[in-house]
Image (cartoon, rainbow, N blue to C red):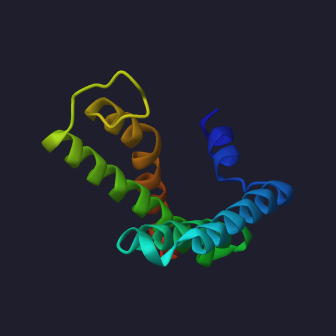
Amino acid sequence: MNTEADQEINEDLSLPARLLLGGSTLLMGGLMVLIASPEEGDKRLFFYAFAGFCFLISFACVARGRPRQFVGSVIGAVVFASGLWYLASTLSAGPLASASSAEPSTVNALLYMAFFGLPGAAYAWRTRFGFRKAG
Protein backbone atom coordinates (compact mmCIF):
# COMPACT_ATOMS: atom_id res chain seq x y z
CA MET A 1 0.00 0.00 0.00
CA ASN A 2 2.78 2.44 0.86
CA THR A 3 4.59 1.94 -2.48
CA GLU A 4 1.35 2.56 -4.38
CA ALA A 5 0.81 5.80 -2.47
CA ASP A 6 4.38 6.91 -3.18
CA GLN A 7 3.92 6.25 -6.90
CA GLU A 8 0.70 8.25 -7.01
CA ILE A 9 2.21 11.15 -5.09
CA ASN A 10 5.30 11.31 -7.30
CA GLU A 11 3.39 11.29 -10.60
CA ASP A 12 3.21 14.53 -12.54
CA LEU A 13 0.07 16.45 -13.29
CA SER A 14 -1.45 15.73 -16.67
CA LEU A 15 -0.51 17.99 -19.57
CA PRO A 16 -3.91 19.79 -19.66
CA ALA A 17 -3.74 20.42 -15.91
CA ARG A 18 -0.18 21.77 -16.16
CA LEU A 19 -1.14 24.01 -19.10
CA LEU A 20 -4.23 25.33 -17.30
CA LEU A 21 -2.34 26.03 -14.07
CA GLY A 22 0.70 27.45 -15.88
CA GLY A 23 -1.39 29.63 -18.15
CA SER A 24 -3.53 30.91 -15.29
CA THR A 25 -0.56 31.85 -13.15
CA LEU A 26 1.21 33.43 -16.13
CA LEU A 27 -1.88 35.55 -16.79
CA MET A 28 -2.21 36.45 -13.09
CA GLY A 29 1.45 37.45 -12.89
CA GLY A 30 1.10 39.62 -15.99
CA LEU A 31 -1.97 41.32 -14.54
CA MET A 32 -0.14 41.99 -11.27
CA VAL A 33 2.63 43.74 -13.22
CA LEU A 34 0.08 45.78 -15.16
CA ILE A 35 -1.95 46.93 -12.15
CA ALA A 36 1.07 47.93 -10.06
CA SER A 37 0.62 51.69 -10.28
CA PRO A 38 3.48 54.13 -9.74
CA GLU A 39 1.35 56.09 -7.26
CA GLU A 40 1.36 53.19 -4.81
CA GLY A 41 5.05 53.62 -4.05
CA ASP A 42 6.15 50.95 -1.57
CA LYS A 43 3.15 48.72 -2.29
CA ARG A 44 4.27 48.32 -5.90
CA LEU A 45 7.09 46.05 -4.72
CA PHE A 46 4.53 43.59 -3.31
CA PHE A 47 2.71 43.51 -6.65
CA TYR A 48 5.99 42.70 -8.42
CA ALA A 49 6.95 40.09 -5.81
CA PHE A 50 3.60 38.33 -6.21
CA ALA A 51 3.94 38.53 -10.00
CA GLY A 52 7.37 36.89 -9.71
CA PHE A 53 5.87 34.16 -7.54
CA CYS A 54 3.19 33.55 -10.19
CA PHE A 55 5.84 33.40 -12.91
CA LEU A 56 7.78 30.81 -10.88
CA ILE A 57 4.67 28.65 -10.59
CA SER A 58 4.08 29.01 -14.32
CA PHE A 59 7.65 27.97 -15.09
CA ALA A 60 7.42 24.98 -12.74
CA CYS A 61 4.32 23.82 -14.66
CA VAL A 62 6.15 23.58 -17.99
CA ALA A 63 9.67 22.62 -16.84
CA ARG A 64 10.93 19.08 -16.38
CA GLY A 65 13.59 17.39 -14.26
CA ARG A 66 16.00 19.37 -12.12
CA PRO A 67 14.82 22.83 -13.19
CA ARG A 68 11.28 21.91 -12.08
CA GLN A 69 12.58 20.53 -8.79
CA PHE A 70 14.67 23.64 -8.18
CA VAL A 71 11.85 26.08 -8.94
CA GLY A 72 9.35 23.93 -7.03
CA SER A 73 11.71 23.90 -4.05
CA VAL A 74 12.04 27.69 -4.22
CA ILE A 75 8.25 27.97 -4.26
CA GLY A 76 7.95 25.56 -1.33
CA ALA A 77 10.61 27.44 0.64
CA VAL A 78 8.90 30.79 -0.03
CA VAL A 79 5.54 29.40 1.10
CA PHE A 80 7.15 27.99 4.26
CA ALA A 81 9.05 31.22 4.99
CA SER A 82 5.91 33.31 4.51
CA GLY A 83 4.10 30.96 6.91
CA LEU A 84 6.82 31.47 9.51
CA TRP A 85 6.57 35.23 9.07
CA TYR A 86 2.76 35.07 9.36
CA LEU A 87 2.96 32.93 12.48
CA ALA A 88 5.61 35.14 14.10
CA SER A 89 3.65 38.32 13.37
CA THR A 90 0.43 36.92 14.81
CA LEU A 91 2.21 35.57 17.87
CA SER A 92 3.76 38.96 18.57
CA ALA A 93 0.82 41.24 17.86
CA GLY A 94 -2.18 39.33 16.58
CA PRO A 95 -5.19 37.80 18.27
CA LEU A 96 -5.25 34.12 19.15
CA ALA A 97 -8.43 33.51 17.15
CA SER A 98 -10.69 35.60 14.94
CA ALA A 99 -14.35 35.50 14.05
CA SER A 100 -13.53 35.18 10.36
CA SER A 101 -11.05 32.97 8.54
CA ALA A 102 -10.11 36.02 6.46
CA GLU A 103 -8.76 37.92 9.48
CA PRO A 104 -5.21 37.26 10.69
CA SER A 105 -4.92 35.19 13.86
CA THR A 106 -2.57 32.68 15.42
CA VAL A 107 -5.02 29.86 14.71
CA ASN A 108 -5.18 30.83 11.04
CA ALA A 109 -1.39 31.04 10.90
CA LEU A 110 -1.09 27.55 12.38
CA LEU A 111 -3.60 26.24 9.84
CA TYR A 112 -1.63 27.89 7.04
CA MET A 113 1.55 26.23 8.28
CA ALA A 114 -0.15 22.83 8.54
CA PHE A 115 -1.73 22.87 5.09
CA PHE A 116 0.74 24.93 3.03
CA GLY A 117 3.96 25.77 4.89
CA LEU A 118 4.97 22.30 6.07
CA PRO A 119 4.14 20.57 2.75
CA GLY A 120 6.16 23.24 0.93
CA ALA A 121 9.12 22.68 3.23
CA ALA A 122 8.74 18.90 2.89
CA TYR A 123 8.88 19.16 -0.91
CA ALA A 124 11.97 21.38 -0.79
CA TRP A 125 13.60 18.95 1.65
CA ARG A 126 12.68 15.88 -0.39
CA THR A 127 13.93 17.23 -3.73
CA ARG A 128 16.91 19.08 -2.22
CA PHE A 129 16.41 21.92 -4.74
CA GLY A 130 17.10 19.48 -7.59
CA PHE A 131 20.47 18.46 -6.20
CA ARG A 132 19.49 15.20 -4.50
CA LYS A 133 21.50 12.12 -5.28
CA ALA A 134 19.83 9.59 -7.53
CA GLY A 135 19.17 6.16 -6.11
Q: Residue furthest front?
A: 39
Residue 19 in percent (x, y) is at 80, 62
Q: Residue at coordinates 41% horizontally, 62% vertically from top-left?
A: 77
Q: Residue at coordinates 36% horizontally, 21% vertically from top-left?
A: 99
Q: Is residue 69 visible?
A: no
Nearer-the-camera pick, 34 or 54: 34
Asked if 8 appears above or below 127 in the picture, the reply is above
Q: Is residue 122 visible?
A: yes
| Total numbered labels placed on residues in the image | 0
Nearer-the-camera pick, 87 or 121: 87
* Quadrant location, the C terminus: bottom right
Asked if 19 appears above or below 104 in the picture, the reply is below
Q: Residue at coordinates 62% horizontally, 73% vertically from top-left?
A: 34
Please identify the quarter of the rendering in which residue 64 is found. bottom right
Please identify the quarter of the rendering in which residue 114 is found. top left
Residue 44 in percent (x, y) is at 44, 72
Q: Is residue 86 left or right of residue 35?
A: left
Please identify the quarter of the rendering in which residue 16 is found. bottom right
Nearer-the-camera pick, 109 or 120: 109
Nearer-the-camera pick, 35 or 18: 35
Q: Residue at coordinates 66% horizontally, 63% vertically from top-left?
A: 28
Q: Residue furthest top?
A: 99
Asked if 75 appears above or below 111 in the picture, the reply is below
Q: Is residue 23 left or right of residue 98?
A: right
